[in-house]
Image: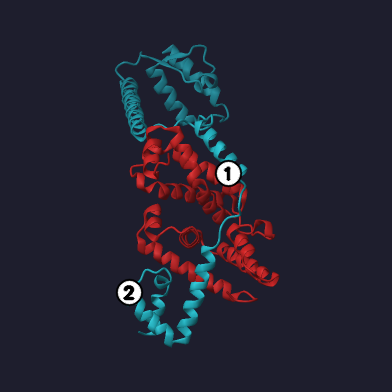
Chain colours: A cyan, B red
Amino acid sequence: MTCRHAISLLEDYVDNELSAEQTALVEQHVSSCLRCREHFTKSKLLKERMSGFFAPPRSAEQWEQTTQLILARSQEPPPAFYRVQRDRTSQARYGLIRSAVSLAVSIFVLVSAMLIGSNHQDQISDSNQPDIPFLVTASLYPEMKLDRTVITVAEQEQLTKGMLLLGPPGCLGRSLLLADLLTELETQ
Amino acid sequence: MNKSIPELVTSFIAGDQRAFEDLVRRFQKRIYSLAYHILGNHFDADEVTQETFVRVFKRRKELHNVNYFSTFLARVATNYSIDLLRKRKIQRSVAEDSATLPGNVQLDLARRVSTPAQDLESKRIMLEIQSALDELPPKQRITVILHDIEGYSKAEISAMFECPQATVRSNLHIARSKLRKILKSRPGPKE
C-alpha cells in the first residue's frame, strides 16, 4: 500500500468504517511508515478530543425550567402578527380563484373600453351627422370662453382644425381667435 | 412504565401531551448540546432547544417514520441554529473560565490525578478546538459537530439534510483536514 492510498483511507479508518481487509492493510502500512503514523496519530487524537466535548452542565432546575417553557409555548396560539398558515392545498386553490377573477375583470374592462372607444370613433368620424352633441373637454372650455359646454360634432371638428392651425395653448391671441371661430360657426 | 421512543412518538402524534413531555425530557439535553456547539452560548442554545420542540409539536403530522424522531429533531434544531447564526452573525463565544468548561472534561479532570499544568493544557486545547471550529464554514462545522461531537452517524446526518452520504463524508473529511491545519498553524503545544 502506498502512502497516498493509506492517507486516502485515513478518515474512514479513524471512523472504524473500513473492511477488515482494508484495516489490516492500513495498519500494516502505518507500522512501517513514520510519516503516515504521525498523520494517523494526529487524526485519532483530534477525534478523541472532539468526542469528549460536551456542553457545560446545567442544574436539574434549569432543565425543568426549559421543559416547562417548552410545554407552555407549545400550547400558545401563534403570535397576532403571524398569519395562520393555511395548508398548501387551500392556499393554492385560493390563489387560483383570485387569478381567475382578476383575469375576468381585466377582460371585461378591456372589452368595454374597446366598445366605448369604437362608438366614440364612429361618432367622431361620422360627418353625416354633424349635429350630434359633443361635450367640450375640460381643457378646451376655459380656453375658448364658451358659455355652453356642448357643441356639435361638426363644430368640434372645425375647432380642432382651427386649433391645429393656431398652435398650442398659450399662443398669442389664440383664445380670441378661437372665440371668433366659434361665433362664426354659430352664425352659420 | 418506560415506553420506547417509537411508542412515545406514536402517542405524541396522536395528541398525547404526556408523551410529548416525556420526549422533551429525554431529548432536550442532546438538542441543547448540539445547539450549544453551533452557537456557543447558553442563551441561544436554550432558545434553540425550546423553539425546536415547539416546532416539532406543531409539525407532528409530518412525522411519517417514528424511528427517525431523533433525526427529525436534530434537523429542526440544526436548521434553526443556522438561521440564528446568520441573523446574529455571531462568532461562537469561547469559554474562558473553568466554570464553563465542558462537563465531561470537568469530571474527567476531577477523576484524573493530574497536575494543574496538565489541567491548564487540556483546557487550552479545548479552547483552541472551539476557536478552530469557529473558522469553518457553517456546513462543515455542523457536519463535524454532529458526527464527531454529538455522535450522529453519516447515515443519520445524510437523512437529516437529505443529501447523499458521500457528501456528508466529503464535508467531514474536509472539515477535519481544515481543523488540523488551523490547529497546526497556531503557536504553542500541538495536539
Residue type at mark 2?
A: Ala
Name the residue that disc number 2 marks.
A20
Q: Chain of mark 1?
A: A
Closest to the observer: B96 or B162?
A: B96
- Label 1 element class: helix
Q: Secondary structure at mark 2?
A: helix
Above or below, comparing residue A128 to residue B24 in the picture: above
Q: Which mark is residue A63?
A: 1
**Placement of B138 over or under A167, stated as above or below:** below
Instruction: Evaluate whether label 1 is on the same chain as label 2.
Output: yes
Residue A135 placement: quadrant? top left
Measured Cα–Cα span from mark 1 to mark 2: 43 Å
Q: Is residue A24 above or below residue A146?
A: below
In the figure, residue A126 lies in which quadrant? top left
Crowd band around label 1 with a 10 angstrom C-alpha radius: few (<14), some (14–19), many (20+): some
Looking at this view, is A27 or A135 the one in front? A27
Residue A111 vs residue B1, the one in the foreground: B1
Amino acid at circle 1: Trp
